[in-house]
Amino acid sequence: MLTIAFVGYGNSVRNYHLPFLAYQENIRVKKIFRREEDRVNDQAIESYYPEIAFTSNWSDIIGDKEIELVVVCSHIDSHADYAWKILRAGKNVLVEKPFTNTSKEAEEIFSFANENGLVAMANQNRRYDGDFLTLKKVIESGKVGNIVELQSHYNYFKPETVKPGFDLLYGLAVHTIDQVYALFGQPDKTIHDVRSIYFPGESDDFIDIDFFYGHTKVTVKCSLFVNTPFPKFTLHGDKGSFIKYSSGHQYKSPNGPTTINLEREDLDNWGTLSYVDEAGVEHIERVPSEITDYGLLYQGLYQAIKYNKPKPVTDIEVLGVLHTLEAGLAAAKKQN
């Protein structure tokens, strides 16, 4: 059994962590740390999980010898601080994305964790989205042949929400950037078009980042100005193409614990694969969607902590993502 604790009890914890952990028989959530100011007039939601002890006493977390892993789901500005406190207390740490504000902070944390036999990892759970797992399955099948181009979109139509600040890059694009690293690793070259339509040099409401891997080009696009359905993934190879629309977002319960659905999505949202086989015969197929299951990340982490298996999200991948974010931020700030 892996006994864990959380720092924070916001949207991420209640909707993207605890509902999936409820299905893990070898992982137990024992405690959740919340700052006193976060609990004011907000303690009613703690009753959603009566089996979990809520506390505002930090020593209740780091002083508990049963707790082996602490999951940090606080604001990004406090990620590094909490990670250091947890590691120095001799516990493993999983940090919500993005792992830290800077790659330098991450390098130092990873170095300390590795030197002391501890696991420090970023929670890049969107690697376990059903649409992404389906894309990965198609690529691994080899049916599209050598990959020429992949486009990944994460869009909304919310122009009224645009304001100064760089929330889109570090808040949403980080997911799709990480998916690129998970599939292809370190790129040969990147080109960053990160800018703001309304606040040039002060925001990042339009993101277009190109990654080059030999003859393969991968594009991550994230925008707040897309008002029509658009494929989540568009894949082209020298034998065929694949298009997949988004599998949607996790249902969030407004009045109690969020529950999850681990059933395959309806056929009408399955991806379409068009390819030519070795005999020259053309095929058009609907590809059954994989199931979104963020519990898979925790099972990989369990194996890393208990049996010293490789981490499902590696240090070099996290650093690659952070380097890309830093370069994108620099490009946005230079915009005239």
Image (cartoon, grey):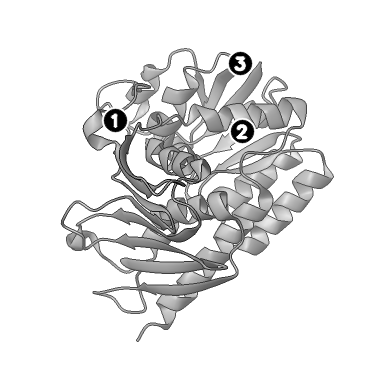
How far is disc 2 from disc 1 in space, using C-alphas? 23 Å
Q: Which mark is residue 252?
A: 1
Which residue is most to the bottom? 336
Q: Quadrant of residue 251?
A: top left
How far is disc 1 from disc 3 in space, using C-alphas? 25 Å
User: Which amino acid type is shown beneath numbered disc 2?
Assistant: Val
Q: Position of residue 139 (x, y in %)?
A: 48, 46
> Total of numbered circles in the picture?
3
Q: Residue at x 57, y 18 (%)?
A: 28
Marks 2 and 1 close (CB-CB < 8 Å): no
With respect to residue 274, does 4 lie above or below? above
Q: Position of residue 12 (x, y in %)?
A: 41, 37
Residue at image mark 2: 70
Determine whether the residue tagged by mark 2 lies in a helix, strand or loop.
strand
Q: Quadrant of residue 193?
A: bottom left
Asked whether residue 247 is in view, the answer is no
User: Which amino acid type is shown beneath numbered disc 1?
Assistant: Lys
Q: Which mark is residue 154?
A: none
Q: Residue at x 43, y 13 (%)?
A: 50
Determine whether the residue tagged by mark 1 lies in a helix, strand or loop.
loop
Q: For the N terminus, which image quadrant?
A: top right
Q: Residue at x 48, y 43 (%)?
A: 136
Q: Nearer the viewer, residue 194 or 333?
A: 194
Name the N-terminal-most of marks 1 and 3. Answer: 3
Q: Which mark is residue 26?
A: 3
Q: Position of residue 249 (x, y in %)?
A: 31, 38
Asked whether residue 48 is in view, the answer is yes
Q: Quadrant of residue 239?
A: bottom left
Which mark is nearer the camera, 2 or 3?
Answer: 3
